[in-house]
Image: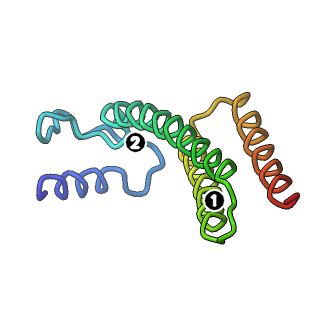
């Protein structure tokens, strides 16, 4: 930790009052990694793993949300109100899960995929509102 602080102050000292990066920290290594304020090697692997994780979360949450919505729609309403409460819970939980999964992956979607996914989700919400208010 002390090494990082010392290197930071060296870097600050050499770049003070200038707007360009002064590369006077030659051979500055900590734990086998070169100290460079614009180094992005470690972050590239993290971003790639985050994108894959976001896609997996989006797919799994979308499938689980659609299953919950289907269960909420297909659950028979009997004389007691418990089935209706459970169905409402499945519908609400499915919608929240769908929105959270989409929000996690939205930044990594392509420009073409974003409006398509939002349009599909909007259609699901309108369909659910129509189906529930019709009863």
Image position of 130 (left or right of 32): right
In the image, 19: left or right of 95? left
Q: Residue placed farthest to the bottom in the image?
A: 81
Classify residue 25 by image quadrant. Answer: top left
Tag 1–tag 2 contact (CB < 8 Å): no
The circle drawn on residue 21 is 2
Count of numbered tags:
2
Indicate the position of residue 66 as horizontal and vertical percent values: 61, 42
- Tell me the residue at 55%/41% (across/down): 105
Element carrying mark 2: loop
Q: Is residue 41 above or below residue 66?
A: above
Q: In percent of the image, x 55 and y 37: which residue is there?
A: 63
**Which of the two marks, 1 or 2, is nearer to us in this view?**
1
Q: Quadrant of the C terminus?
A: bottom right
Q: Is residue 106 or residue 37 the one in the foreground?
A: 106
Q: CA distance from mark 1 to mark 2?
A: 60 Å
Q: Quadrant of residue 113?
A: top right
Q: Which residue is mark 1?
A: 87
- Mark 1, other Cα within 10 Å: few <14 / some 14–19 / many ≥20: many
Disc 1 on helix, strand or loop? Answer: helix
Vertical comparison of 1 with 108: above or below: below
Asked if residue 130 is positioned above or below residue 112 in the image, the reply reads below
In the displayed structure, 124 sits above or below 48; it is: below
């Amino acid at each position: 930790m002390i090494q990082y602080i010392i290197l930071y102050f060296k870097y600050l000292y050499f770049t003070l009052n200038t707007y360009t990066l002064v590369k006077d920290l030659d051979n500055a290594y900590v734990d086998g990694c070169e100290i460079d304020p614009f180094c992005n090697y470690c972050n590239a692997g993290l971003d790639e793993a985050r994108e894959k994780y976001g896609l997996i979360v989006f797919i799994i949450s979308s499938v689980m949300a659609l299953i919950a919505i289907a269960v909420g729609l297909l659950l028979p309403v009997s004389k007691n109100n418990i089935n209706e409460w459970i169905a409402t819970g499945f519908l609400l939980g499915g919608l929240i899960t769908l929105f959270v999964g989409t929000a996690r992956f939205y930044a990594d979607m392509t420009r073409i995929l974003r409006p398509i996914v939002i349009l599909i989700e909007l259609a699901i919400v309108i369909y659910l509102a129509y189906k529930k208010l019709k009863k």
